Amino acid sequence: MRELALNILDITENSVKAKASLVTVLVQARNNTLTIRIEDDGCGMDAEFLARVTDPFTTTRTTRKVGMGIPLFKMAAEMTGGTFDIRSEKGKGTTVEATFVLDSIDRAPLGDLADTVVTLLGDDKGTEFVFDIRVDGEKFVFDTRELKKELDGVSVTEPEVLLFVRDMINENIKSIGGEKL
Ligand SMILES: Nc1ncnc2c1ncn2[C@@H]1O[C@H](COP(=O)(O)OP(=O)(O)OP(=O)(O)O)[C@@H](O)[C@H]1O
Ligand SMILES: [Mg+2]
């Protein structure tokens, strides 16, 4: 089964392509629900395009005629008996929210979220990210703006920085009990 961390990478890459300056990713496990919400302040979509965007044949890609990021994320959530919602406003931004039934046998594992973060950081296009991860009462927030402040001019794309970020995120996810997701 595909990892949800890869769906998160797909959806956040859409936000980067939409020239978002900030993308906020919420991953919240509570009771028997896993909620994943990706919110951006990018270019958004008009109502007509938005209505078609869960159809694989809706894309502004020029390299191929299908776009799978959104349809696959929707399917992954709905397969578990969960829900999917996308809201967007032209010029303002987009919010994608999927809820998963946590104990469904059809739910993909969260997978390597640290790898998703490191991939996004590694091709720094000027978009900032907040990852807000909550497991029951515990939470961990990673904010690239805070990281950049601490780096004091050192690039986030430096291999040592990416390795540090990967370890730090893995440790924090573990410490809030998120590795079992
Ligand atoms: N956050 C967003 N802001 C603005 N437009 C978006 C956003 N997410 C998706 N879109 C638009 O919806 C289209 C479909 O997105 P989707 O992720 O399903 O496929 P894709 O990005 O075109 O291709 P793929 O994800 O397979 O590489 C995109 O081409 C883009 O035009
Ligand atoms: Mg996409």
Image (tube, rainbow, N blue to C red):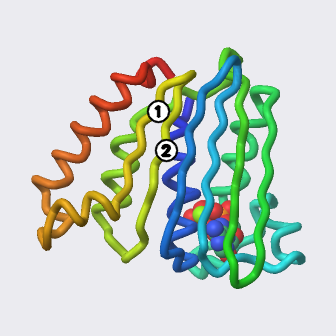
Mark 1 Cα-neighbour bin, 10 Å: few <14, some 14–19, many ≥20: some
- Indicate the position of residue 112 as horizontal and vertical percent values: 39, 36
Q: Nearer the viewer, residue 96 or 6?
A: 96
Residue 172 picture quarter = top left
Residue 45 picture quarter = bottom right
Q: Nearer the viewer, residue 159 or 131?
A: 131
From this view, report whether residue 29 is shown above or below residue 65.
above
Residue 67 appearing in the image = no
Q: Residue at x 54, y 51 (%)?
A: 25
**Secondary structure beneath label 2:** strand
- Indicate the position of residue 37 as horizontal and vertical percent values: 64, 48
Position of the N terminus by quadrant: top right
- 7 sits to left or right of 141: right
- In terms of sequence position, does the residue under pointer 1 or pointer 2 come before the other? 2
Which amino acid type is shown beneath numbered disc 1? Lys
**Mark number displayed over residue 59:** none
- Indicate the position of residue 5 as horizontal and vertical percent values: 49, 41
Which amino acid type is shown beneath numbered disc 2? Asp
Q: Nearer the viewer, residue 66 or 52?
A: 52
Are dots 1 and 2 in contact, CB under 8 Å? yes
- Quadrant containing ligand 2: bottom right
Give the spatial CA distance, label 1 vs label 2: 7 Å
The residue tagged 2 is: 132
**Mark number displayed over residue 139:** 1
Q: Nearer the viewer, residue 78 or 133?
A: 133
**Secondary structure beneath label 1:** strand
From this view, report whether residue 44 is shown above or below residue 137.
below
Q: Is mark 2 within 8 Å of ligand 1?
A: no
From this view, report whether residue 175 is shown above or below residue 140.
above
